[in-house]
Amino acid sequence: MNSVCKRFRPIAFDDRLWTTIDLTTKPYSNRELFRFVRLFPCNNTTVLKLSGMPNDQGKFPPFTEQLIRAIRTSYPNLGYLHLSHYNFHKNMRTVKNITSFPSNLRGLYFTKCEMAFRSMHGSLAFL
């Protein structure tokens, strides 16, 4: 078990430090990202950046509905979501549901993602 000194713990868990969470410096599996999102919820997080981990053949992982639900629950005041290296072809419901993030989401950014835009549904105001 990892320990944190008593002085550092309040600093590490100060919500003001978690306004931007950038998990793109290295790719993470969906399991690792889901676990992180569930273990570190924060009402103050306004920017979340996630990057999927391509498999051995260089294929991008699917962005799952489970991860969408966890993000919605853990970061209710999310304003900007950046997603890179994900495949949205496998589950078209995920593409539909990604447009149902809270109305305070002001930016949704895709970098090196695979998806068919004709399958996206949602209000034109969102898109």
Image: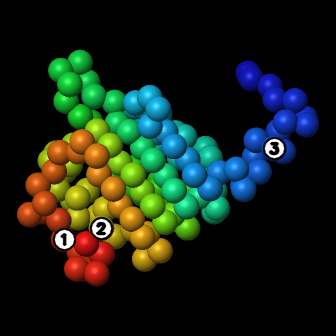
Looking at the rendered structure, the kind of residue marked 2 is Thr
Could you say which is closer to the camera, residue 85 or residue 122? 85
Could you say which is closer to the camera, residue 75 or residue 82? 82
Q: Is residue 105 above or below residue 115?
A: below
The secondary element bearing badge 1 is classed as loop
The secondary element bearing badge 3 is classed as helix
Residue for point 62% across, 46% down: 40
Checking the image for residue 99, the label placed there is: 2
Q: Is residue 52 left or right of residue 116?
A: right
Q: Is residue 23 above or below residue 105?
A: above
Could you say which is closer to the camera, residue 40 or residue 21? 21
Residue for point 13% across, 60% down: 117
> Residue 45 placed where, x, y %?
59, 58
Mark 3 and 2 residues: CB-CB less than 8 Å, in contact? no
Q: Is residue 119 left or right of residue 68?
A: left
**Residue identified by numbered label 3:** 11
Looking at the rendered structure, the kind of residue marked 1 is His
Q: Quadrant of the N terminus?
A: top right
**Residue identified by numbered label 1:** 121
Q: Quadrant of residue 116?
A: bottom left
Q: Is residue 116 visible?
A: yes
- For the residue carrying disc 3, how many other residues have a C-alpha within 10 Å: few (<14), some (14-19), or many (20+)? few
Mark 1 and 2 residues: CB-CB less than 8 Å, in contact? yes
